[in-house]
Each structure stands twice: as C-alpha cells, then as structure tokens.
Image: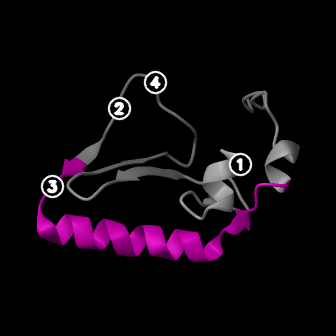
C-alpha cells in the first residue's frame, strides 16, 4: 500500500464522522445502501443498484462530495491506522 500511495496510484480518505450511507461506484456500476437512524435492521436489507449513465454520474458527484469532506492519508500515517476493527456500538 505504501508504494501505491507514494506513487499516487492510491489515495485513501478518512471521513470525520460515522457515516450512515454505504456505496460502491465503478466506471460501470453503482450500489448504495442507507443505514436507518435507529441502527441496522438485520431482518431487512435494502440495496439500490444501477448501471445507467445518469446513476453513474450522480454516484460520482456523491463520491466527490464525500471526498471533499475527508482527510487524505499519506503513506507515513498509514501505520497509525488501527489494524483491528473497533467494537460495534450497541
């Protein structure tokens, strides 16, 4: 990861708060799920997916918005990121 980050082939941004949305965007696919205010409802999963041009453009704008809110890590700070996940809040 360090080499990719140093060569500018990989950039990692960290958002300042817990996010209530999860999404995946590529050149040809978009997927989004929204977490409910009261937490995750394990009895029901809702996912929005699409591959049309309009949803891909919208997804890219959404990514750009969240990226602008993030702090970009450099390869030196990568070692300070937790290697074990934090426990889930109950």
Q: Is 70 colored magenta in this rendering? A: yes
User: In terms of sequence position, does the residue under pointer 3 or pointer 2 come before the other?
Assistant: 2
Crowdedness near tag 3: few (<14), some (14–19) or many (≥20) residues, C-alpha within 10 Å: some
Q: How far apart are marks 4 and 3 (CA)?
A: 26 Å
* Residue 27 in picture, x, y percent from top left: 25, 59
Label disc, if present, on residue 42 of the rendered structure? 4
Q: Distance between the residues labelled 2 and 1?
A: 35 Å
Q: Name the residue under label 2.
A: 45
The kind of secondary structure element at disc 3 is loop
* Colouring scheme applied when the structure was drawn: one colour
* Residue 90 in picture, x, y percent from top left: 73, 29
Q: Give the range drawn in magenta.
A: 49-76
* Residue 11 in picture, x, y percent from top left: 60, 61
Residue at image coords 59%, 65%: 8
Instruction: Judge left or right: residue 26 versus residue 66.
Output: left
User: In terms of sequence position, does the residue under pointer 2 or pointer 1 come before the other?
Assistant: 1
User: In terms of sequence position, does the residue under pointer 1 or pointer 4 come before the other?
Assistant: 1
Q: Is the magenta stretch mostly helix, strand or loop?
A: helix
Crowdedness near tag 4: few (<14), some (14–19) or many (≥20) residues, C-alpha within 10 Å: few
In the rendered picture of this protein, how many numbered marks are placed on residues?
Answer: 4
Q: How far apart are marks 3 and 2 (CA)?
A: 20 Å
Crowdedness near tag 1: few (<14), some (14–19) or many (≥20) residues, C-alpha within 10 Å: some
Of the pair 19 and 13, the residue shown nearer to us: 13
Label disc, if present, on residue 51 of the rendered structure? 3
Crowdedness near tag 2: few (<14), some (14–19) or many (≥20) residues, C-alpha within 10 Å: few
Q: Would you say residue 10 is visible in this rendering?
A: yes
Q: Name the residue under label 1.
A: 2
Of the pair 3 and 60, the residue shown nearer to us: 3
* Residue 21 in picture, x, y percent from top left: 49, 53
């Amino acid at each position: 990861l360090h080499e990719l980050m140093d060569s500018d082939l990989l950039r990692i941004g960290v958002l300042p708060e817990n996010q209530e949305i999860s999404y995946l965007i590529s050149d040809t696919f978009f997927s989004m799920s929204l977490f409910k205010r009261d937490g995750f409802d394990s009895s029901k999963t809702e996912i929005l997916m699409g591959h049309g041009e309009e949803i891909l453009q919208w997804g890219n704008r959404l990514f750009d918005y969240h990226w602008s809110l993030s702090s970009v890590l450099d390869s030196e700070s990568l070692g300070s990121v937790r290697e074990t996940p934090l426990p889930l809040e109950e």
